[in-house]
Amino acid sequence: MSDNSNAELSKTPLHSLHLELGARMMAFAGYDMPIQYPLGVMKEHLHTRAGAGLFDVSHMGQILIRAKSGDQRDAALALEAITPVAVAGVGEGRQRYGLFTNEAGGLEDDFMVANRGDHLYLVVNAACKHEDLARIEAALSATCEIEAQFDRGLIALQGPAAESALSALAPQAAEMKFMDVRELTIDGARAIVSRSGYSGEDGYEISLDAMDTDRIARALLADDSVEAIGLGARDSLRLEAGLCLYGNDIDQTTTPVEANLKWAIQKARRTGGDREGGFPGADVILKQFETGPERLRVGLQPAGKAPVRAGAELFSAESGGSPVGTVTSGGFGPSAGGPVAMGYVPTALSDVGTTLFAEVRGKRLPITVAALPFVQPTYKR
């Protein structure tokens, strides 16, 4: 990419390191980001599953929320006005997957929220972070102090060797369990660390001051088990793990129930719960809990070796008829050993084993509804 083409793109604190490592860079969510390194997407993917991969996710948005009352629970209850998630049920030092919904029940973004004792810590998607910040400010400013930390670094260390690599620099990392969040000192740098990630593997997400990010990334890469991994492998890893990509598998037109994310809405926020409803689109979403949605996000296993990409239409018959669904993510799954995909189908056609047909370049190819995930997660619980 030439200097002119990326002049307007933002750069993460690791931009120089990516260039030094020979990354192929590409515009993503307004940032100049590494898509792959000389190792290549396939080997980067497999290395993450076998060793440890280091991902630059500094383009994502980090936001702090503090209740003006000084009581963190007040901030959690305030946030519940714009999310169906039971934020007030998150214990100190723990985090939870969250969703922002709209009045139609659609998804505005997904995020992670942690209880840091005296404040909430959110990580939101890069492409949505400014809208998310505005949404939070509009709803919470009267009762909460909101601080965007969009200039901080954020790196993800994922894979079976992640614990040994990080605990060599921060021994307490080994004590953490899945979804724990702690402040750790990593080789002299203060970091907010969660034991979570987006690959289906055990690992960590590490928030750092921008000035510390490059040094800590290099310290981790000095471990023989750690390789730099680009967004290409990040996408194939999360697809095998059955994890949604906002803008592809979930968006403003899909509800949490349609997206098969009912598990993300705790009983306290459902009909009959202690804090039932009260979030945007509650009437639509809670009704779908009772009646069931007309369509569902499912795993899809194409026959043969050819991947079926996002946007492919799905049919119930080999010829004739109108499309019944759409593929939202698709590609080759290196660990699954073949093509994998996700998409939306009518609930009546959502049972595992149902055969459908995906239209690829004018031909209809068999594709089977499959159980998610394609690769079982290895989280440390």
Image (cartoon, helix red, strand yellow):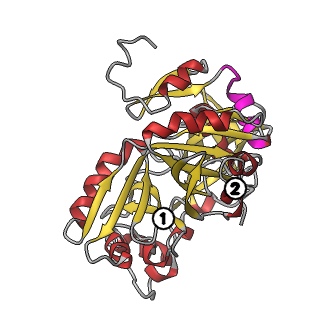
The residue under label 2 is 171
The secondary structure type at the circle numbered 2 is: helix
Instruction: Identify which amino acid the numbered label 2 is placed on.
Output: Pro
- Residue 224 position, x and y percent, is 77, 33
Residue located farthest toward the left when viewing the structure as drawn: 142
Report, in whole angstroms, how far the alpha carbon at label 2 lies from the one at label 1: 22 Å
| Image x and y of residue 28, in percent | 44, 31
Label 1 environment density (alpha carbons within 10 Å; few <14, some 14–19, many ≥20): many
Q: Mark 1 points at which residue?
A: 114
Residue type at mark 1 is: Ala
- Mostly what secondary structure, the magenta segment? helix
| Helix, strand or loop status at disc 1 | strand
Q: Which residue is drawn at 70% across and 31% down?
A: 44
Give percent across and percent down for residue 348: 60, 62
Q: In this view, does 22 lie above or below 178?
A: above
Q: Where is residue 121 in the image (x, y as percent from the top left)?
A: 43, 61
Instruction: Read off the magenta span.
Output: 38-49
- Residues 77 and 177: in front is 177
